[in-house]
Amino acid sequence: MSDSSRLADSLRVTSRSFDTNTGAEPAAISVPTSPFSVALTFAVESVSHLSNIQLLLPSPDRLSLITTTAVTTLVVFFIVRYVLYPKWGRAIPSPLRASFPDVPPDAIKSQVYHPDVLPGARDVTTPYGTIRVYEWGNVNGPKVLLVHGISTPCITLAPLARALADKGCRVLTFDLFGRGFSDGVGDLPHDDRLYASNILLALASSPLPWTGNHAFHLVGYSLGGALAASFAAGFPRLPASLVLLAPAGLIRTADFGTIARLTFRSGLVPERLLALATKSRLQRPIAASSKRKPTQADSLRDELSSSSPTAKVADVVASETKGPEGTPTLPLERRVDEYVRWMVTHHAGFVPAFMSCIRHAPLTDQHPTWASLGRLLSPGRIAVLLARHDEIVNCEAYEREGRPLLGDVDKVHWGVLDGNHDFVMTHVEDIMAQLDSFWGLVRKERI
């Protein structure tokens, strides 16, 4: 038997299918045995298989629908991502650059916070944007650098700065990135590294030398205290002394509450929604509690009646701008409180900076930094001044946990003064008395 005959016998099949018109089963079809017939049979079978494959492919209309759906889904995804997870600009212009150029000079002076609120103003151009710096006082006097808190510009420290200038000091202060009239930084975390650069750029902008061994006294308040501690630990030879006024840093992370930590630090809440919620909370009048909380956890959790995460972080703002409810409010406190709400509206970089500080700034668990200060700074170069009725910083906890980290009792100037967290505005004379003792200042005429 020839090869073609054997192949035909092996391929002899019976194809059964239904007639599309009658539904009847056709008779079996015998495959011919000639070589040509075998080839023809292969061709017919191949066409049949291709037809089955084509049946599995979508029709042109269906393919068009699938393509349109996929493109629409991608477009919606990128739109939602852009809306809910915005990428802030590298340098977010402050009101001084964003809106004030179109405002008449007389109208600028009537603003809640105007650019010449302190003497010696200058704008410093940096790779991060502009920084608003103020420097004045005796050019030959002791140099003092002041660093403010998380939610306010440097006007919070204006009474203390003026008192130091009256004592013959050369004073330098500035608005941190995203506050006052300094640009915001939108593409970097607001951590101690960014603010160390902020400090160094402000110092480098002076016509006077502010570097070298023991070149200046470094004073930090609230968040500024935590930043000053981190800066001094990184550059221990630079400051002649370190003064921490109600500093952040030793508050326990757990004291912020689980919900607040997850909301601000987990990344689960879309950035845009969190920014809107924070902005809405900070624009409302801030009222602090009239009760003194016995523990750090109580002071952070229960100060406001609201239990929302944004209300918890707003407690920090309240503590920096006014004292507990029922206590007299000074004109400066009222102005600062108004400015915080004004800044939320007019400074596009403020809310991103505030939220980034909650996530990245050295607000909590900075015990290793304090231990480094105890090792690196010689005796007599550290002073810690706390307020007895502080709503944020617990004096007892700080003395119990922080003081041993800084060294022996004789090594550190430790003081507990009257007042609340805003005592830098309300108890300036008491703070100056401590600094007189610590630095040995005497009153001099300003030059």
Image (cartoon, rainbow, N blue to C red):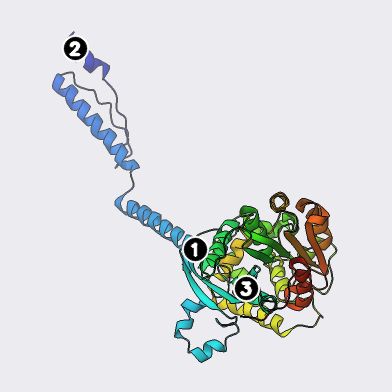
First along the sequence among labels 1 and 2: 2
Residue 62: image location, x then y, percent = 35, 52
Q: Which residue is mark 2?
A: 3
Q: Is residue 128 left or right of residue 279?
A: left
Q: Which residue is mark 1?
A: 86
Up the image or down, 421 lies above or below 45; here it is: below
| In this view, the mark in front (3 or 2) | 3
Query: Circle 1: is it few (<14), some (14-19), or many (20+) Cα within 10 Å?
Result: few
Q: Which residue is mark 3?
A: 171
Q: Is residue 399 left or right of residue 342?
A: right
First along the sequence among labels 3 and 2: 2
Rounded to the nearest angstrom, the CA distance separating label 3 from label 2 is 107 Å
| Residue type beneath disc 3 | Val
Which type of secondary structure does the marked residue at label 1 adopt? loop
Rounded to the nearest angstrom, the CA distance separating label 1 from label 2 is 74 Å
Q: Is residue 192 left or right of residue 324?
A: left
**Which quarter of the figure is the N terminus placed in?**
top left
Q: Is residue 270 visible?
A: no
| In this view, the mark in front (1 or 3) | 3
Q: Is residue 71 visible?
A: yes
Which type of secondary structure does the marked residue at label 2 adopt? helix
Up the image or down, 270 lies above or below 137; here it is: above
First along the sequence among labels 1 and 3: 1
| Residue type beneath disc 2 | Asp
Kindly identify the residue that appears in the image at 66 percent across and 61 percent down.
Answer: 240
Query: Circle 3: is it few (<14), some (14-19), or many (20+) Cα within 10 Å?
Result: many
Residue 232: image location, x then y, percent = 65, 57
Q: How many marks?
A: 3
Residue 204: image location, x then y, percent = 52, 65
Which type of secondary structure does the marked residue at label 3 adopt? strand
**Which quarter of the figure is the C terminus placed in?**
bottom right
Where on the picture, by quarter, is residue 41? top left
